[in-house]
Amino acid sequence: MKLKNTEKVIGTGNIKKIFTLGMVCCLLTGCGNMIPELTEEEASLIATYAADVVLENSKDNNSRLMDTEEETARLTELSEKVEKLKEKKALEEEEEREEAEQSSGGSGGASSNALTVDSIASFIGLPEFQVSYDGYEIKKSYAAEEGDEWEPTFDATSGKNLLIINLKVTNISDAPAVADVLSKDMKFSVKGDQGINGMALVTLLLNDFSFAQDEIGAGESKQYVLIAQIDESITEVNSLSLQMKKGEERAVVTLQ
């Protein structure tokens, strides 16, 4: 009867583990003057099992395995994104050359036949969302989460700064929805004062707006970025516009 009560408190599985640990201790310490002779493989198995049982039942066990799984999932996501970027890279570079050639003639270039719009989301085709400009930053390097070792860092090339356009995507519907920019095959470029005029760069960042394809809850928001390179002498921007291309359609929206 006493044993049954003990089982309720400790649990049958734990009793078995404790008994097994007792057996392990006997094997390791021996009985009287008898010292068991174990092969290296047997000793390793016993030590490994004992360590697993102790860790499993330790109050200080914070599940490093869980942490590892999260890190692996994040790295897998990065790897998948890298593959998608590789497939698009050649096309993006060609588009950038074409846009640069068209824009070199001034205002009669890439945006000459572009429709002026007020809504980024409407042009892209995201009826459940509102995409709003959330300011800019100028840096030499950028990471979505500062100090996160698994988040890739994007660096400016020599003689350049990064112009980071911050965009806030808000689900304005009453149900979760996917902010799918990736499948729309969008092309973005940034234009501003001081000669700023260039394509948004291809990055490996998880919050790159060009490759957004995330579910966002009703009423919730998520931050994204578009990044272009500018001359390192530019430290402040007064006017900015975002030029968008979807297939043969073009549009421009004033950011500031």
Image (cartoon, rainbow, N blue to C red):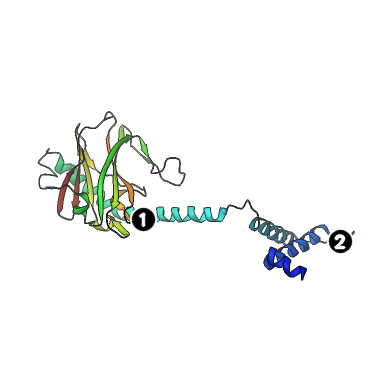
Label 2–label 1 contact, CB within 8 A:
no
Residue at x 68%, y 56% (from the top left corner): 54
Screen quadrant of the C terminus: top left
Residue picked out by circle 1:
83
Q: How crowded is mark 1: few (under 14 residues within 10 Å), some or many (20 or more)?
A: few
- The mark closer to the camera, 2 or 1, is 2
Q: Which amino acid does label 1 sit on?
A: Glu
Give coordinates of residue 4: x percent, y percent. Answer: 73, 70
Most extreme residue toward the right is: 33
Observer-nearest of 5 and 33: 5
In the rendered structure, find residue 204 and report the number of the disc placed on it.
none
Residue kind at label 2, given as amino acid type: Cys
Looking at the image, residue 10 lies above or below residue 101: below
Question: Helix, strand, or loop for circle 2?
Answer: loop
Q: In this view, does 149 lie above or below 171?
A: above
Examine the image and state in which quarter residue 40 appears. Answer: bottom right
Give the Cα distance between marks 2 and 1. Answer: 61 Å
Q: Where is residue 78 in the image (x, y as percent from the top left)?
A: 40, 52
Q: Which of 90 and 117 is in front in this view?
A: 117
| SS at circle 1 | helix
Residue at 23% x, 47% y is: 188
Q: Where's the N terminus, which quadrant? A: bottom right
- In the rendered image, residue 189, in percent from the top left (x then y), is placed at 22, 44
Residue 55 in the image, given as x and y percentages of width and height:
65, 55
Crowdedness near tag 2: few (<14), some (14–19) or many (≥20) residues, C-alpha within 10 Å: few
| Residue 31: assigned label | 2
